[in-house]
């Protein structure tokens, strides 16, 4: 069975491969408000864990709240890279972790 990732899910995967992201950051970066729905889809369809850690913060009204931060486990990263056939490219003029990914052909 071939599973295709929508553009927002592709962006979510690339973000989480690089580092953990808050729900708020992901909304902006993937261009979708329903981040938890996309995460749930990835968990179900690709068998990923994608833990969500609740971190304390102060909202714009000065109230203490907890905001979710999504990240890939090491196993999630291996699964996603194997699924997508991704290899990290690190041109000499880029810093480590400031890279993008390209699909192997």
Image (cartoon, grey):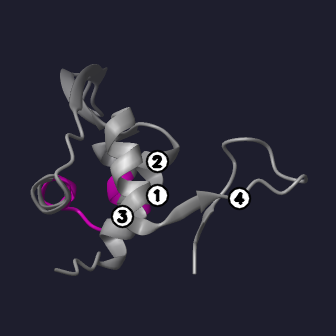
State the residue in front, 78 or 37. 78
Q: Position of residue 47 (x, y in %)?
A: 16, 51
Mark 2 residue element: helix
Label 4: few (<14), some (14–19) or many (≥20) C-alpha neighbours in 10 Å: some
The part of the image, by quadrant, that contains residue 54 is: top left
- Answer yes or no: is residue 91 visible: yes
8 relative to 17 in the view: left or right: left
Q: Residue at x 22, y 33 (%)?
A: 51
Residue at the disc numbered 2:
17
Residue at the disc numbered 3:
83
The reply to whether the C-beta atoms of the residues labelled 1 and 2 are less than 8 Å apart is yes
State the residue in front, 16 or 29. 16
Q: Nearer the viewer, mark 4 or mark 1?
A: 4
Label 3: few (<14), some (14–19) or many (≥20) C-alpha neighbours in 10 Å: few
70 relative to 103 in the view: left or right: left
Q: CA distance from mark 2 to mark 4?
A: 13 Å
Q: Position of residue 72 (x, y in %)?
A: 34, 39
Quarter in which the C terminus is drawn: bottom right
Residue at the disc numbered 1:
14
Mark 4 residue element: loop
The reply to whether the C-beta atoms of the residues labelled 4 and 1 are less than 8 Å apart is no
Q: CA distance from mark 2 to mark 3?
A: 13 Å
């Amino acid at each position: 069975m071939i599973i295709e990732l929508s553009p927002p899910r592709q962006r979510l995967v690339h973000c989480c491969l690089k580092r953990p992201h808050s729900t708020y950051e992901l909304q902006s970066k993937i261009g979708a408000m329903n981040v938890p729905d996309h995460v749930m889809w990835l968990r179900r369809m690709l068998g990923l864990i994608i833990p969500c850690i609740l971190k304390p913060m102060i909202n714009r009204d000065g109230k203490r709240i907890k905001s979710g931060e999504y990240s890939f486990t090491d196993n999630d990263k291996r699964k996603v890279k194997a699924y997508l056939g991704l290899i990290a490219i690190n041109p000499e003029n880029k810093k480590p972790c400031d890279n993008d990914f390209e699909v192997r052909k």
